[in-house]
Image (cartoon, rainbow, N blue to C red):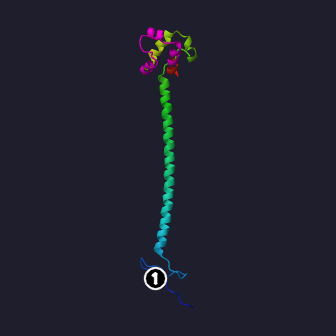
Amino acid sequence: PAPASAPAPAPAAGEPDTNDDSGSEIDVEAVVEDDDEEIDEAMMLEMEEDDGAEQERQAAEAAAAQAAAEQEAKAKAQAGRPSPPWPVATVGDAPKKEVVGWIQDHASAELLKRHKLSGNRDRVAKSRSKKEIEKAYKDLVE
């Protein structure tokens, strides 16, 4: 029987490995570096995908929170809004002085100023047309 050959010693650091079966030299460090670079690239891609998914999740949460806040604000605004004594469609049939008085009692100063309804009720009712008063009423209740 042929004597078993002893394994060749490992090359020193920085030296090429000349002991492969094909007879060609292999640079082990270069192979390891190439593998490390491929692993690093794969990890970076995975991290970027994770970041994208996290950003999408955060955006969805922010949108849901904003929608909930808007809905809550709308509910609060409607809860604080007075119940109108006349339907918008028939407010033109109500006496101008009563409508002006109700608007003045329930509207903000800004709305009163915008529609020129500030001041004495009787004078405002005389100086504004029904259409102007109806528009202010509609703006207030809708």
Is 65 drawn above or below residue 49 in the view shown? above
As drawn, the residue found furthest toward the bottom would be: 1
Near-viewer residue (23 or 117):
117
Q: Residue at x 45, y 20 (%)?
A: 114
Give the residues in magenta. Answer: 109-136
**Which amino acid does the dot numbered 1 rest on?**
Pro
Locate residue 112: give its quadrant. Answer: top left
Q: Position of residue 9 (x, y in %)?
A: 45, 82
Q: Position of residue 84 (x, y in %)?
A: 52, 17
Locate residue 110: give its quadrant. Answer: top left
- Please name the residue that numbered disc 1 is placed on: 9
Q: Is residue 122 located in the magenta-colored stretch of the structure? A: yes
Is 10 drawn above or below residue 73 in the view shown? below
Q: Residue at x 50, y 77 (%)?
A: 26
Q: Is residue 83 visible?
A: no
Number of labels in the image equals 1
Q: Position of residue 90 (x, y in %)?
A: 57, 14
Q: Is residue 31 visible?
A: yes
SS at badge 1 = loop
Q: Is residue 115 located in the magenta-colored stretch of the structure? A: yes
Classed neighbour count for the residue bearing mark 1: other residues with Cα under 10 Å, few (<14), some (14–19), many (≥20):
few
Most frequent secondary structure within the magenta stretch:
helix
